[in-house]
């Protein structure tokens, strides 16, 4: 693929940008929010993101000997839980494209006294630097919507997943109720950028986050994209009226 | 029936706070790291999963994996199991253990050493009033069965766990839940109106 080809455009929030530009713009967003990321996460979701992540853990069915990849793992909420759930036979890798997010994650986990061996890898979901058929579980929480070529990422994830392994995507999705959708739109387009401005002094990044959520494929579309990439027994669970959906699929 | 997430999180907190208080117990439980235990309470038609992680126990209403050991019985029979000799209880058939029996026996012995009074523990951690409200709320939510109600229920549950300090008395809870019911009805009506408007527009 020619990355200099500016003919191809993609969306960055609601804007159209050259495909080659999207990744650097996304990186800039997360560079900018990294240090305030956890605080904003709690504020934005009113703490509910912890429940969404807990549900992800329940559905992951992780066992102590599993090799687990937390992709787009950012500041490591899921990786931390997984590292507590695995033993010396298992392995937890936190991979993210953004060095600033990885660093914040590592610092946070060290501050919390988490010494279990999480490995930190800077990697792009679109071309994962791991062996074929390696991981028992792969999770991607709130990461996929930032990826430029989602199909490519799904293929790359499928490649590194072991046969019998399970992949889970936790991502903002499309509310299943009209009224709720209206309230949610007001919240995320009006209030969220203001919160972003007040707390992180960065309303643009939060504007991007709100827009990128709306541009993300809906529940059914994402499920068929997973099937296209080869995943089987795909399903999704809506949480908080579909604000967030947890998709999962197996490789056989 | 499935326990709502906030309730499993509260039980989890109670257990872990209890274990943290005793280094001996912590050490004993750490030998189970990585094990998944399922308890099926037949009288409540309820399953609870316990995942022993390296530094705590995770309590979950579901877990997408095969448990190492499953205990099945009524709440009374299971609490007797802790007090009695295991073979007695198993012999009478009141409790069934599936999977790794050795682990089952071992766990039973560990728990017999440290009987946990859950209600009391929950009360010390959360306060009597809240514990009472929680169970009252839980009983009420049991009755909500249809799909749309379940959505609201799970939203309230999510809300509850983070806002629990705000709930002061039984009276407030009742009026809150009834206003949620009201809101739900209003919402249904509004939705119907929006739908009608949209049809008219077309
Ligand atoms: C909203 S954060 C989510 C962090 C964490 N998983 C959580 O749930 O809190 C999104 C993360 O995706 C990462 N990301 C964006 N594009 C990526 C890509 N192509 N490959 C890997 N990670 C990517 C960003 O750097 C950022 O850390």
Image (cartoon, coloured by chain):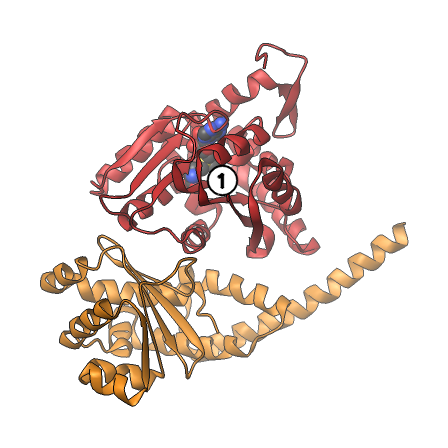
Please indicate, yes or no, whether residue B101 appears anywhere in the rendered image: yes
Image height check: is B159 above or below A221? below
Question: Which residue in the rendered view is the most extreme toward the top?
Answer: A4
Q: Is mark 1 within 8 Å of ligand 1?
A: yes
Q: State the image coordinates of residue B38 (x, y, percent, origin top left).
A: 35, 68
Answer yes or no: is residue A197 visible.
no
Question: How many marks overall?
Answer: 1
Point out residue A171 in the picture as x, y percentages from the top left corner.
Answer: 53, 43
- List x then y, in percent, for residue B142: 51, 77
Q: Quadrant of ligand 1?
A: top left
Chain letter for mark 1: A
Q: Position of residue A29 (x, y in %)?
A: 48, 27
Q: Residue at x 29, y 78 (%)?
A: B119
Relative to residue B143, is residue A196 depicted above or below? above
- Residue lying at the far bottom of the rendered structure: B92
Q: Secondary structure at mark 1?
A: loop
Q: Residue at x 31, y 82 (%)?
A: B95
Q: Nearer the viewer, residue B87 or B154?
A: B87
Vertical placement of residue B110 versus A55, above or below: below
Snapshot quadrant of residue B164:
bottom left
Decide if residue A216 is on the left or right side of residue B122: right
Going 39% across and 28% down the picture, which residue do you hit? A130
Identity of the residue furthest to the left in this view? B24
Chain shown in red: A
Q: Colour of chain B?
A: orange
Q: Is residue A57 left or right of residue A191?
A: left
Provide the residue designation for mark 1.
A142
């Amino acid at each position: 693929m020619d990355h200099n080809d500016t003919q191809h455009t993609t969306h960055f929030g609601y804007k159209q940008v050259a495909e080659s530009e999207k990744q650097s713009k996304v990186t800039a967003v997360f560079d900018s929010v990294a240090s305030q990321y956890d605080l904003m996460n709690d504020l934005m979701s009113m703490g509910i993101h912890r429940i969404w992540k807990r549900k992800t853990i329940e559905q992951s069915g992780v066992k102590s000997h599993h090799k687990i990849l937390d992709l787009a793992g950012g500041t490591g909420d899921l990786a931390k839980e997984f590292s507590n759930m695995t033993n010396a036979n298992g392995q937890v890798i936190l991979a993210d494209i953004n060095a600033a997010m990885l660093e914040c994650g590592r610092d946070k986990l060290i501050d919390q006294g988490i010494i279990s061996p999480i490995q930190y890898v800077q990697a792009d979901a679109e071309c994962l630097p791991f062996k074929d058929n390696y991981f028992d579980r792969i999770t991607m929480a709130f990461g996929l919507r930032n990826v430029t070529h989602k199909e490519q990422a799904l293929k790359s994830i499928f490649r590194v997943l072991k046969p019998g392994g399970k992949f889970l995507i936790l991502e903002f999705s499309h509310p299943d109720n009209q009224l709720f959708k209206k309230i949610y739109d007001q919240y995320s387009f009006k209030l969220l950028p203001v919160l972003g401005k007040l707390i992180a002094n960065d309303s643009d990044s939060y504007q991007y986050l709100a827009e990128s959520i709306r541009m993300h494929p809906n529940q059914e579309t994402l499920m068929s994209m997973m099937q296209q990439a080869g995943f089987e027994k795909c399903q999704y669970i809506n949480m908080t009226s579909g604000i967030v959906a947890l998709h999962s699929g197996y490789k056989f | 029936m499935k326990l709502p997430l906030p309730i499993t999180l509260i039980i989890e907190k109670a257990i872990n706070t209890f274990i943290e208080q005793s280094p001996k117990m912590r050490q004993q439980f750490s030998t189970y790291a990585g094990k998944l235990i399922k308890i099926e309470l037949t009288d409540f038609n309820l399953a609870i999963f316990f995942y022993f992680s390296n530094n705590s126990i995770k309590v979950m209403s579901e877990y997408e994996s095969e448990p190492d050991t499953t205990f099945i019985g009524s709440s009374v029979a299971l609490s007797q199991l802790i007090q009695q000799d295991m073979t007695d209880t198993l012999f009478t058939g009141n409790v069934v253990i599936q999977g790794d029996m050795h682990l089952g026996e071992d766990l039973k012995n560990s728990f017999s050493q440290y009987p946990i009074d859950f209600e009391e523990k929950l009360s010390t951690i959360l306060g009597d009033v809240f514990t009472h409200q929680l169970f009252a709320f839980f009983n009420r939510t049991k009755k909500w069965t249809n799909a749309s109600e379940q959505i609201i229920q799970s939203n309230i549950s999510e809300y509850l766990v983070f806002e629990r300090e705000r709930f002061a008395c039984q009276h407030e809870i009742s009026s809150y839940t009834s206003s949620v019911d009201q809101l739900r009805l209003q919402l249904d009506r509004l939705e119907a109106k929006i739908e009608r408007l949209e049809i008219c527009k077309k």
